[in-house]
Amino acid sequence: MKLVDLHTHTTASDGLHRPADNVRMAREAGLHAVGITDHDTVAGIDEAEIAGKKLGVEVVPGVEISTAEDGKDIHILGYYIDRRNPVLLERLASQRQVRNVRNEGIIANLNRLGIPITMAEVERVAGRSGDGDETVGRPHIAEALVRRGAVSSVQEAFDKYLAKGKPAYFNPPRISPFEAVQWIHEAGGKAVVAHPGLYGRDELVERLLDAGADGVEAYHSDHSPEQAEHYRRMAEARGKLVTAGSDFHGERKGGGVYHGPIGNRTVDAGILEQLRR
């Protein structure tokens, strides 16, 4: 059986490893293919594809679009999108601007809490210049808090400051997941609801599938076997695709591998033809 992991992150967003490293790790895990699905950017795909050709690993071009519905963060994965599409690129740029507003809001909240962290400091941690297509995420802010000694680990940073409901959390208005599905379709791709078990909103997942989402990520590092089976049945009952992904971000200081190692969740490579179709 040829296996694929359809959900990994790189240094183009909030992953710790370069795209080529993800491809190398996919090969070491015995995978046929690996998805590069960075948050609101396609900047890591070209490097991954070059590595894939050298190493004999198929790279699935993707993106993970950040959305919100009724105050709840929802992520939509897009596969085989036309990443040169100017409309898509403009839309992703607008998404990154919202992410920048979110980051500045978190920094402001941390400053009010007596932690004099700056955005420039976070960008240095992330290895960003502030003017590229790569994104800065909360894990980068968490790492900056660790480095300045405000917390002892990335996990503590989320538990104490950055998670929803914590004092530094800030989340500006975002597009709806239904709009993200439309964006992906208009860019020629397939739209899949990412890690539905993390939302506690099965009625929303069902509405997304009924409204045109092409599938659901039933197998995810943070899903129990029971959840995986539940979402598999939900998708198959509607004739939708069932995907799998580790959601690999890398190993962070004091935080372990987040969410899981490459190849931790896989599906048969036959899914690729259905995603391309």
Image (cartoon, rainbow, N blue to C red):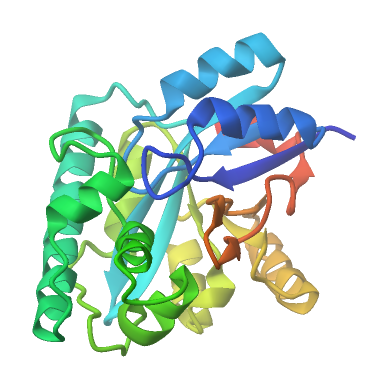
Would residue 201 be found to the left or right of residue 238 on screen? Answer: left
Quadrant of the drawing holding the N terminus: top right
- 27 vs 34, left or right, is right
Q: Is residue 20 above or below residue 241?
A: above
Which residue does the image show at 75% across and 34% down from the upper left?
Answer: 269
- The image position of residue 176, as x and y in percent, is 27, 65
Instruction: From this view, report whether residue 269 is shown above or below residue 175.
Output: above
In which image quadrant can residue 90 be found? top left
Quarter of the C terminus within the rendering:
top right
The percent coordinates of residue 31 (x first, y second) are 77, 33
Residue 111 lies left or right of residue 260; in this view the side is left
Tell which of 28 and 239 is nearer to you: 28
Can residue 212 be spotted in the picture? no
Residue located farthest toward the right when viewing the structure as drawn: 1
What percent of the width, then of the height, locates residue 108?
A: 9, 73
Q: Quadrant location of residue 237? A: bottom right
* Direction top: furthest residue: 54
Asked whether residue 107 is in view, the answer is: yes
Eyeballing the image, is 57 above or below 266?
A: above
Residue 198 higher or lower than 247, as above or below: below
Q: Residue at the location (31% across, 37% down)?
A: 186
**Residue toward you, 108 or 217:** 108
Q: Position of residue 231 (x, y in %)?
A: 67, 70
